[in-house]
Image (cartoon, rainbow, N blue to C red):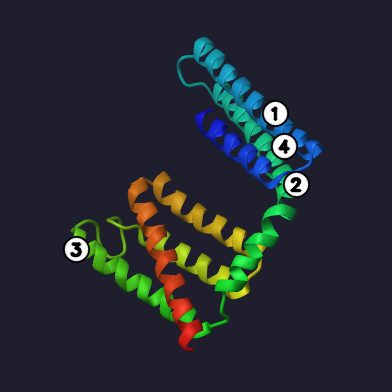
């Protein structure tokens, strides 16, 4: 619920900043309320199932999974609604930023990814944690994933492709947390290293290439 409330506040503040129409704001608010209600019902179902069946039972698992699935469906609907409403306000500005920074450089992309890999290995060696290919600070998967996402964003300069690439990078990074291979700090630092180095390298290729 905390995560839902934080996301809802950010979206509503963004909507007010972008000056969406009253109808669009109402649709966003209804979508958010629908997700919050689904989450509350999910919590209620889980509490009742735990009360009735404190020990593991296949039917109890089905009830919990179905309730959680309802929240996921509601969240997907809210995401679609948010995209349909906010895309026309956000994507043009994002596209102009990518156009200012972007450069179609295949060599720059290759060099940036290689530098990211080298820097990650060096940082792991300095921190004395993990191995070059597993664990440690920073997360190599997050660094490479966000490096590629940044390169795709700056080379294509397409807002939608950029957002999809960043979403995939975030999913790769999240998988490292779910597998408990990395901490949140490892993943965040890895993402910053990947995006930062790639941006700098591509800007240098744009300036001197």
Q: Earlier in the sequence, mark 3 or mark 1?
A: 1
Cβ atoms at labels 2 and 3 below 8 Å apart? no
- Left or right of 102? Residue 20 is right
Question: Foreground mark, 2 or 3?
Answer: 2
Residue 119 percent across, percent down from the top left: 30, 70
Residue 22 percent across, percent down from the top left: 79, 36
Q: Earlier in the sequence, mark 4 or mark 1?
A: 4
Q: Nearer the viewer, residue 130 or 59?
A: 130
Cβ atoms at labels 3 and 1 below 8 Å apart? no
Question: Which residue, as the protein is rendered here, is positioned at the far bottom?
Answer: 209
Q: Which residue is mark 3?
A: 126
Q: Mark 1 packing: few (<14 Cα in 10 Å), some, or many (20+)?
A: some
Q: Which residue is mark 4?
A: 28
Q: Mark 2 packing: few (<14 Cα in 10 Å), some, or many (20+)?
A: some
Q: Which residue is mark 2?
A: 85
Q: Which mark is residue 145?
A: none
Q: Residue at x 46, y 14 (%)?
A: 54
Is residue 87 shown above or below 28?
A: below
Q: Earlier in the sequence, mark 1 or mark 2?
A: 1
Q: Gap between marks 4 and 1, in whole Å? A: 10 Å
Q: Residue 101: which quarter of the image?
A: bottom right
Res. 181 in view: no
Q: Earlier in the sequence, mark 4 or mark 2?
A: 4
Cβ atoms at labels 4 and 2 below 8 Å apart? yes
Residue 11 percent across, percent down from the top left: 62, 40
Res. 177 in view: yes
SS class, disc 4: helix
Question: Which residue, as the protein is rendered here, is positioned at the far top?
Answer: 52
Cβ atoms at labels 4 and 3 below 8 Å apart? no
Is residue 77 shown above or below 112?
A: above
Q: Which mark is residue 34?
A: 1
């Amino acid at each position: 619920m905390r995560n839902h409330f934080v996301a809802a506040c950010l979206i509503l503040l963004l909507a007010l900043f972008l000056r969406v129409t009253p109808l669009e704001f109402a649709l966003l608010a209804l979508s958010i309320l629908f997700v919050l209600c689904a989450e509350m019902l999910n919590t209620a179902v889980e509490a009742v199932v735990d009360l009735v069946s404190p020990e593991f039972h296949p039917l109890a698992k089905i009830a919990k999974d179905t309730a959680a699935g309802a929240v996921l469906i509601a969240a997907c609907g809210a995401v679609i609604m948010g995209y349909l409403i906010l895309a026309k306000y956000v994507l043009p500005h994002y596209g102009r930023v990518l156009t200012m920074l972007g450069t179609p450089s295949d060599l720059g992309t290759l060099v940036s990814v290689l530098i990211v890999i080298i820097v990650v290995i060096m940082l792991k060696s300095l921190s004395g944690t993990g191995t070059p290919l597993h664990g440690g600070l920073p997360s190599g998967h997050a660094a490479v994933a966000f490096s590629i996402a940044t390169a795709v964003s700056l080379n294509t300069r397409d807002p939608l492709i950029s957002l999809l690439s960043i979403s995939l990078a975030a999913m790769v990074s999240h998988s490292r947390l779910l597998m408990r291979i990395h901490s949140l700090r490892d993943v965040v630092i890895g993402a910053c290293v990947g995006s930062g180095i790639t941006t700098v390298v591509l800007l240098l290729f744009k300036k001197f290439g």
